[in-house]
Image: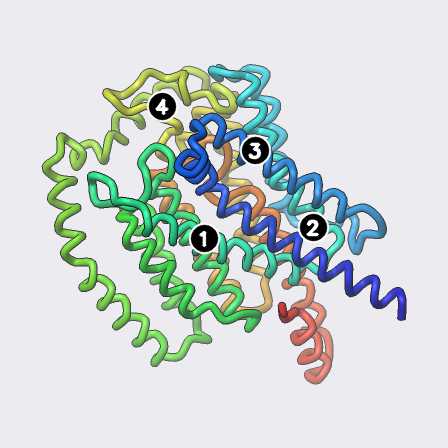
Amino acid sequence: MKSEATASESISGGSGMAFAVGFFFSFRLAVAILSIKLFGADLQTGSAIKLALGFLLFGVAGFFSFGAATRTLSSLLRPSSVRWAMLFIAVSGCSLLWSETASPIASMAYWLGTAIDVATIIFLLRVGSVPEVAASVMKGFIWASCSVALIAWLMPTQYDFRLGDENIFNPNSICNVCVFAVFFAQYLMRRKMARFGLVTVFLVLTIIRTLSKTTIAAFIVSQVYLVIQDRSMSRRSKLFLTIASIMIVLMFWGLFEAYYNFYTTNGNQAETLTGRTVIWNFVLDGALERPWIGHGFDSMWNVVPTFGTFEARHAENEFLEQAYSYGVIGIVLLCGVYGSLYSNIRRMAQQSSKVICISMILFVIVRGFAEAEPFDLLLPLWAVVLLGVLVSQDAEVGAAAASLSPSANAIVQTQSVVPIR
């Protein structure tokens, strides 16, 4: 009895820790703006606070992982997508040796921040139930994204009618975390682990309200794919979603017109895709100068020349970003991470969950045509590791269930879904 109680307490504590980690992964987007607006801090201090909180969670998660683990590190590295993510982290860390970064110390701190995100997830998965840890991380991320969205709605709108702040609380980033929160909510609802209907509506409204063109376009493509491919969704539900989408477009039609007029009449934004074409040309030339190993981690911010009044933090294209930073090696790593994760997902047992995960990959691929991340992939490496382990276990459970009798099959499928209280 005592050992059972101890195990129950451990799982409960692990779930709370996983929720906190997921909450932080989304809410840190708002840390800088809150530090500046509420406490008068500067942008550098806000960034330092985010990194410090990440290190703190890493330490606490490491403390939770001490003792008897439910799985070994080698078992967590078994999914190919996890190994590719680890290889990406290793190569990006090694590239600091030849990186043309403006501040080696700051770049090292940012690389460590990316690495400890992954390590924190591994600590959680090592000691907890994979479905429960994943669900708790997703829940924390969803509620934090709602908080981020609420902050964005309460702030004064920008001069171009978008939410947030262009430099500190970017509307593209706000839209991005809300999109991933929607994917996580869809996954949990398909698994019958939570009810996030109203939350999803609020997040979708925020996504549209950010007026983040590329992210919204990628989200629409991914959701159209999901609706078409998800055979578990009834025709009535699909019709309802279609009507709701039309109503949302009509609701925001006046705002769309105002933003379109601003976008097409303010300078040459429409012709240059808000300056992206100039950046692409520069990055492509730079990538060809060092085609094999690239310019290294964090080699653009405060290094490349400004483009008019705009200072590029990344290449505005994920393929070009990896080519510029790590050369051919970066392209191979990019294809390896996404390709291996897609391969893992295809072996999932539950069709509706498989469609949602593939939709997520489709979203980052489409978004990658005009967006990038300076330190990470558009599908964060911590999410690659979490999804890689989760979908691989799902595939193993499905394979085991397929070899059993129909009654045992139903029992295994029921046990693979862990309800979160």
The residue positioned farthest toward the front in the image shown: 39
Q: Residues within 10 Å of mark 2 (few under 14, many from 20)?
A: many
Picture quadrant of residue 235? bottom left
* Disc 2 residue type (three-letter): Leu
Chain-order first, disc 1 or disc 3: 3
Quadrant where the C terminus is found in the figure: bottom right
Say which residue label 4 marks.
Answer: 283
* Disc 3 residue type (three-letter): Leu
Say which residue label 3 marks.
Answer: 51
Proximity of marks 3 and 2: CB atoms separated by less than 8 Å: no
Say which residue label 1 marks.
Answer: 145
Observer-nearest residue: 141 or 179? 141
Chain-order first, disc 4 or disc 2: 2
**Real-space CA distance between mark 3 and mark 2, rounded to the nearest whole angstrom:** 19 Å
Observer-nearest residue: 28 or 293? 28
Disc 1 or disc 2, which is closer to the eye? 1
**Real-space CA distance between mark 4 and mark 1, rounded to the nearest whole angstrom:** 32 Å
